[in-house]
């Protein structure tokens, strides 16, 4: 995100207004989510992005909002990716729309060439 959107990446939890956390699902959803959430202060509002590795754009994921019971998580979405790239699919379109709406951003469509950088807590934002 950039200054034009009103959201800027900062360097620490202390400086941030909210966290954007990416959670790759490698084993069991609950275990993977707990691992990521333990690294985020409980007082920081968080957007949690559950990342499912698959090559199928029609892969069915569990209802993401029901999988997380943490008070600081204001939004949980699911995304599908393969080999470091988001798939072009309705699941990802819905997730991106929900994130933009939750953060009060103008509605902008993402492209299938967008890359995923790293995992875990990806950014501290203000």
Image (cartoon, helix red, strand yellow):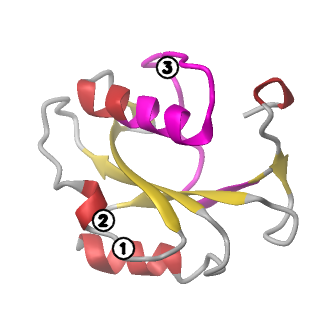
The one nearer the camera, 10 or 55, is 10
Q: Is residue 29 magenta?
A: no
Q: Identify the residue at horizontal 13%, vertical 39% (top origin).
A: 59
Residue 26 in the image: above or below residue 126? below
Q: Which residue is mark 3?
A: 110
| Residue 98 appears left or right of 58 | right
| Residue 125 appears left or right of 122 | right
Report the magenta residues as a range.
Answer: 95-124
Q: Is residue 18 visible?
A: yes
Q: CA distance from mark 2 to mark 1?
A: 7 Å
Instruction: Please tell me how crowded label 1 is: few (under 14), some (14-19), or many (20+) other residues with Cα within 10 Å.
Output: some
| Residue 27 appears left or right of 8 | left
Name the image quarter holding residue 14. bottom right
The one nearer the camera, 119 or 18, is 18
Of label 1 and label 3, which has the lower sequence position? 1
Q: Which residue is mark 2?
A: 26
Q: Identify the residue at horizontal 78%, vertical 70% (top origin).
A: 13
Residue 75 in the image: above or below residue 89? below
Q: Is residue 100 magenta?
A: yes
Which of discs 2 and 1 lies nearer the camera? The answer is 1
Residue 46 in the image, given as x and y percentages of width and height: 57, 62
Of label 3 and label 2, which has the lower sequence position? 2
Residue 68 in the image: above or below residue 51? below
As helix, strand or loop, the secondary structure at mark 1 comes to helix
As helix, strand or loop, the secondary structure at mark 3 comes to loop
Q: CA distance from mark 1 to mark 3?
A: 26 Å
Residue 26 in the image, given as x and y percentages of width and height: 30, 65
Name the image quarter holding residue 27. bottom left
Label ID, residue 32: 1
Q: Identify the residue at horizontal 52%, vertical 25% (top origin).
A: 114
Q: Identify the residue at horizontal 60%, vertical 40% (top origin).
A: 103
């Amino acid at each position: 995100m950039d200054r034009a959107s009103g959201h800027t990446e900062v360097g620490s939890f202390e400086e941030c207004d909210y966290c954007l956390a990416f959670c790759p699902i490698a084993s069991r959803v609950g275990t993977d989510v707990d691992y990521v959430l333990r690294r985020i202060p409980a007082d920081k509002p968080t957007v949690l992005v559950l990342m499912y590795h698959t090559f199928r754009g029609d892969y069915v994921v569990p209802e993401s909002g029901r999988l997380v019971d943490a008070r600081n998580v204001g939004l949980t979405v699911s995304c599908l990716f393969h080999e470091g790239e988001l798939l072009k699919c309705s699941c990802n379109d819905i997730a991106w729309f929900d994130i933009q709406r939750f953060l009060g951003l103008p509605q902008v469509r993402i492209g299938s060439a967008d890359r995923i950088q790293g995992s875990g807590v990806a950014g501290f934002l203000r």
